[in-house]
Image (spheres, rainbow, N blue to C red):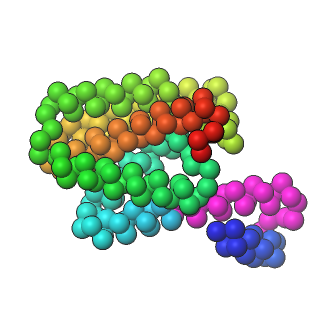
Amino acid sequence: MNRIVSKILIFITKQNVISNDEEVQNFYKYGIEISISSLLNIFLVVCLGLIIHHVIESIIFISIFILIRSFTGGYHANTYFKCNLLMCVTYILIVSLNIILSNRITLPIVIGLICFNLTVVWILGPVENKNKPIEQFRRTKLKVIGTIISIIINCIGIILIKSYIGTMIIFTCVSISILMLAAIIKEKRGDVYE
């Protein structure tokens, strides 16, 4: 990935889109890396969906994941490879869980999962990345927006609970909460296990 990012940086610098200033270069480098990694995550999850014949679930998963995580934050791997791997593994686990449990899950369990999700989002959100601190006034705004979006998405999930789409929505929201908890645990352990 470093080679691709370097070539893009060189190209846009030669086109006089950005300056040679080190701070500017680092800013754009980080932005390009994040963009490529995010696009790769989307591509990989959709490809996995195609391979296992669960494209709709892959679109639901990635859409909800990106939307909610942009307000709540969560676990961040220390390399882009680990990030992409974690996204793929999480998707496979959620789809597998959905296949196994979508017709067996009861309303009390669904309500419990939703309560777990909303509690984690409200109490822990937004989970801060040490490389990207959040100012206090923005933190409150992100917490409220993240909670509202989570409520809306969970309500859609509960309305559609009799279908595999509803359970996919609920399980995806729960996976986001689990990754938020994982980020807090990782922070408390000081990246020792990363």
- Judged left or right of residue 161, residue 15 is right
- Judged left or right of residue 64, residue 18 is right
Magenta: main secondary structure equals: helix
Task: Name the quadrant of the N terminus.
Answer: bottom right
Residue 60 at least partly seen: no
Residue 47 position in % (x across, y down) = 37, 69
Residue 157 position in % (x across, y down) = 24, 41
Task: Name the quadrant of the C terminus.
Answer: top right
In front here: 124 or 23?
124
Residue 5 position in % (x across, y down) = 69, 69
In front here: 146 or 17?
146
Residue 24 position in % (x across, y down) = 81, 57
- Judged left or right of residue 94, residue 134 is right
Highlighted range, magenta:
17-39
Q: Residue at x 41, y 41 (%)?
A: 176
Q: Residue furthest front?
A: 193
Q: Residue at x 50, y 30 (%)?
A: 125
Q: Residue at x 39, y 51 (%)?
A: 90
Q: Is residue 126 magenta?
A: no
Above or below, 173 relative to 84: above
Above or below, 183 relative to 3: above
- Judged left or right of residue 7, residue 67 is left
Q: Residue 103 is drawn in which quadrant?
A: top left
Q: Is residue 31 magenta?
A: yes
Residue 146 at least partly seen: yes
Q: Residue at x 50, y 59 (%)?
A: 84
